[in-house]
Image: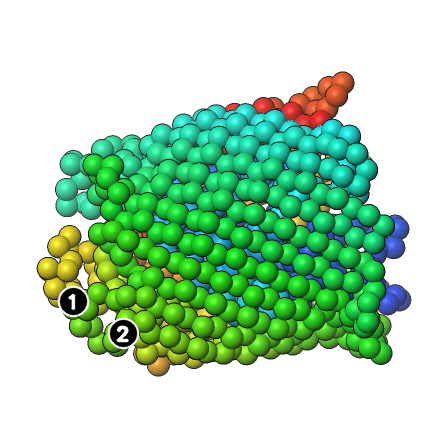
């Protein structure tokens, strides 16, 4: 049903894409990945944005084998929200775990949690957001200068847990001293929206050539979310629920950083200290709130001076102390999570070996996660990992490039004390002090073909082994934030997968963009499966939370994505664009033919945007189809249509530029629920909201 309803849109995208092609009497050789330069007479489109997350030698979106999206500039400023998941929820192939307005994490092609690596400037976020969907990331979207999304399994640079993809949030916390202005910065104030948000953001920096500093600060406060209708989709007793408000969804956040950078003839180095402090409600119906804090130190250095066979080196290190407490309705602490973690990586681009260029690398990480209190889902666990990887590129004549990657990763997991009184559950047999050592190998093969001028065809195949996370093995306890009692399976082994991506791109002409499809097969895919109601005795589950267990089954993910831009008007001073985007994913257990749980529905969007240097305006219609393919224990989720719009005006000033903006979301006040969310029955998406703001840059 999902495929059939999406065929008309897919056919329209293909027709627009194909009709924009024009005969070529002579096809010049395509640009190399290193230069990616178009002839001067051809207009350059967004596919020529460089993707720094793709390796030491950045490539453009046009030259990568796998699907990629980049949010930057005005586009990022327009969609940025208080959580990373909601900021990216409109990106093709990306949905959100939406756990109320205070917490959401990206889901890429139906894969989330530990399968999506969320990075801060190339290093792990070092929080606990992958442990549970009610744990927000500690990265602030309003500080980001760009966000890069790499879809698919060909992301070996960042670990086996990146099998679903990578989200890299890039900010200016460590300033680039080589390009610093004597003084630069921004001030932004915004208010309104469905949560009655009040936000202030300040960024200021300066210095002199080869030495620079930067300070960022944010404060945000919001009330309970306005929603259409009642919170709980419980038609048996609608009168006992508040109308038009989602109780327990307010939040308050402070975030800031201070950083410095230095540069010299053959390199640069810098450091930044980040702090993130938030308290937000989890609208699970029992008054839960989360108080979260993290302090993180980031260090990085780069040299371009050759040594041995290497052309230089880039090193990054992140160290963080993280804690969050889950509060009950009486504001008393029920459970506290602590995570002391670090991650380091070294990338060594090597000199050309014949026609082969590439990068060798090392990565190491350690995480000490502990929980204490009434709802300890996972016992204390120390995870240590180390990896070596290589990414190589080989030109195949003038019209094709081969991209190869390999990674070998080792992990050691040490588990602390486990409560011996836990009720027995099949598949769970934890012992105190258990240690597990495991290794995983991954490899990828990508081919980029340039069949015609301004066209590229990308094909990517990858094999990966993801090692089970501590929660998947040893979880055993109530989790009020997801209204679930979660149990691990200690016998789980590596999750093996083979993926294939195909994408066709066009970067210049009347229609630009990309269309593509993917197939992803898993052996022993790990997911949460609902257990029978009596699986956990009432003495251990007094709140009668729904029991779930991490289990493994063979699975297949298939889907498609499209993002096309029609350039109706394209002059030096004025642009009018019509954009079409769509995505769908279908996930099935291959042995039973049953759907997997919490898979997003097919979606489509149409946008009309105008800009003339001072005015920016955009109108958007977003449609999510009903999700009628659902796993046992789930229910169907109705489709919805939302109307969004924004307008902004720039005003030049003697020392900078003012921008006034107005942004409306869900202007028709449609009721919408996210099928991916554990709380879809409790927490609908925001109702009608209009945000007004002022931004000054200098």
The residue depicted at 15 percent of the width and 36 percent of the height is 240
Which residue occupies the extreme top position in the image? 654
Q: Quadrant of the C terminus?
A: top right
Q: Is residue 405 visible?
A: yes
The residue depicted at 42 percent of the width and 59 percent of the height is 368
Q: What is the quadrant of residue 192 in the picture?
A: top left
Viewer-nearest residue: 302 or 400: 302
Task: Characterize the local packing of mark 2: few (<14), some (14-19) or many (20 or more) Cα atoms within 10 angstroms.
Answer: some
Viewer-nearest residue: 350 or 84: 350
As displayed, is residue 199 above or below residue 406? above
Instruction: From the viewer's perspective, tell me whether residue 562 is left or right of residue 182.
Output: left
As displayed, is residue 623 above or below residue 314? above
User: Where residue 672 sits: x, y (%)?
Assistant: 36, 45
User: Where residue 367 sits: x, y (%)?
Assistant: 45, 60
Q: CA distance from mark 2 to mark 1?
A: 12 Å
The residue depicted at 25 percent of the width and 51 percent of the height is 373
Q: Earlier in the sequence, mark 2 or mark 1?
A: 1
Instruction: From the viewer's perspective, tell me whether residue 409 is left or right of residue 36.
Output: left
Mark 1 — residue? 421
Q: Quadrant of the N terminus?
A: bottom left
Q: Is residue 444 visible?
A: no
Instruction: From the viewer's perspective, tell me whether residue 630 is left or right of residue 265.
Output: left
As displayed, is residue 142 above or below residue 114? above
Q: Which element carries disc 2, helix, strand or loop?
A: loop
Instruction: From the viewer's perspective, tell me whether residue 655 is left or right of residue 287.
Output: right
| Residue 431: mark in rendering | 2
User: Where residue 144 sits: x, y (%)?
Assistant: 60, 42
Q: What is the quadrant of residue 395 in the picture?
A: bottom right
| Residue 72: mark in rendering | none
Q: Which element carries disc 1, helix, strand or loop?
A: loop
């Amino acid at each position: 049903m999902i495929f059939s309803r999406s065929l008309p849109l897919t056919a329209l995208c293909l027709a627009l894409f194909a009709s924009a092609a024009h005969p070529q009497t002579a096809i010049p050789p395509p640009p190399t990945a290193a230069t990616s330069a178009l002839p001067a007479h051809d207009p350059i489109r967004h596919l020529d944005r460089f993707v720094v997350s793709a390796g030491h030698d950045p490539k453009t979106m046009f030259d990568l084998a796998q699907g990629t999206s980049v949010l930057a500039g005005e586009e990022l400023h327009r969609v940025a929200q208080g959580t990373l998941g909601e900021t990216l929820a409109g990106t093709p192939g990306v949905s959100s775990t939406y756990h109320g307005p205070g917490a959401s994490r990206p889901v890429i092609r139906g894969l989330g949690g530990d399968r999506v690596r969320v990075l801060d400037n190339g290093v792990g976020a070092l929080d606990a957001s992958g442990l549970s969907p009610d744990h927000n990331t500690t990265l602030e979207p309003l500080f980001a200068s760009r966000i890069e999304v790499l879809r698919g399994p060909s992301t070996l640079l960042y670990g086996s847990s990146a099998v679903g993809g990578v989200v890299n949030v890039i900010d200016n916390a460590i300033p680039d001293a080589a390009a610093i202005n004597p003084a630069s910065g921004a001030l932004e104030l915004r208010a309104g929206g469905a949560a009655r948000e009040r936000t202030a953001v300040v960024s200021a920096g300066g210095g002199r050539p080869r030495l620079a500093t930067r300070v960022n600060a944010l404060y945000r406060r919001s009330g309970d979310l306005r929603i259409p209708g009642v919170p709980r989709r419980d038609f048996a007793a609608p009168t006992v629920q508040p109308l038009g408000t989602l109780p327990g969804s307010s939040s308050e956040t402070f975030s800031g950083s201070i950083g410095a950078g230095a540069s010299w003839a053959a390199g640069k180095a810098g450091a930044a200290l980040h702090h993130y402090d938030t308290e937000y409600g989890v609208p699970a119906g029992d008054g839960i709130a989360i108080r979260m804090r993290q302090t993180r130190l980031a260090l990085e250095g780069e040299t371009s001076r050759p040594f041995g066979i290497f052309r230089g080196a880039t090193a990054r290190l992140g160290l963080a102390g993280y804690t969050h407490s889950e509060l009950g309705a009486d504001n008393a602490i029920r459970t506290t999570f602590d995570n002391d973690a670090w991650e380091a990586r070294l990338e060594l681009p090597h000199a050309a070996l014949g026609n082969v260029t590439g990068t060798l690398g090392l990565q190491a990480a350690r995480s000490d996660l502990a929980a204490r209190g009434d709802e300890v889902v996972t016992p204390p666990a120390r995870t240590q990992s180390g990896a070596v990887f290589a990414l190589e590129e080989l030109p195949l004549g003038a019209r094709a490039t081969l991209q190869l990657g390999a990674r070998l990763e080792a992990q050691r997991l040490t588990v602390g004390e486990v409560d011996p009184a836990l009720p027995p559950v099949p598949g769970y047999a934890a012992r105190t002090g258990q240690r597990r050592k495991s290794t995983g190998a991954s490899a990828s093969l990508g081919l980029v073909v340039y069949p015609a001028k301004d066209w590229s065809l990308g094909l990517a195949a990858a094999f990966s082994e993801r090692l089970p996370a501590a929660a998947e093995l040893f979880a055993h306890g109530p989790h009020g934030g997801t209204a679930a009692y979660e149990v691990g399976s200690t016998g789980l082994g590596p999750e093996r997968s083979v993926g294939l991506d195909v994408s066709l791109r066009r970067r210049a002409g009347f229609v630009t963009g990309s269309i593509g499809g993917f197939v992803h097969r898993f052996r022993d895919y790990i997911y949460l499966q609902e257990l029978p109601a009596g699986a956990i005795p009432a003495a251990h589950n007094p709140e009668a939370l729904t029991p779930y267990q991490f289990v493994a089954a063979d699975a297949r993910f298939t889907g498609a994505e499209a993002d096309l831009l029609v350039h109706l008007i394209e002059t030096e001073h004025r642009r009018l664009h019509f954009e079409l985007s769509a995505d769908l994913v279908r996930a099935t257990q291959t042995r039973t033919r049953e759907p997997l749980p919490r898979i997003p529905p097919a979606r489509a969007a149409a946008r009309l945007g105008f800009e003339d240097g001072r005015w920016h305006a955009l109108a958007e219609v977003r449609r999510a189809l009903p999700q009628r393919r659902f796993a046992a224990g789930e229910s169907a989720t109705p489709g919805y249509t939302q109307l969004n719009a924004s307008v902004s005006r720039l005003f030049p000033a003697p020392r900078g530029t003012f921008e006034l903006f107005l942004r409306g979301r869900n202007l028709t006040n449609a009721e919408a629920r996210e099928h991916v969310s554990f709380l879809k029955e409790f927490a609908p998406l925001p109702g009608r909201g209009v945000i007004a703001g002022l931004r000054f840059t200098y």
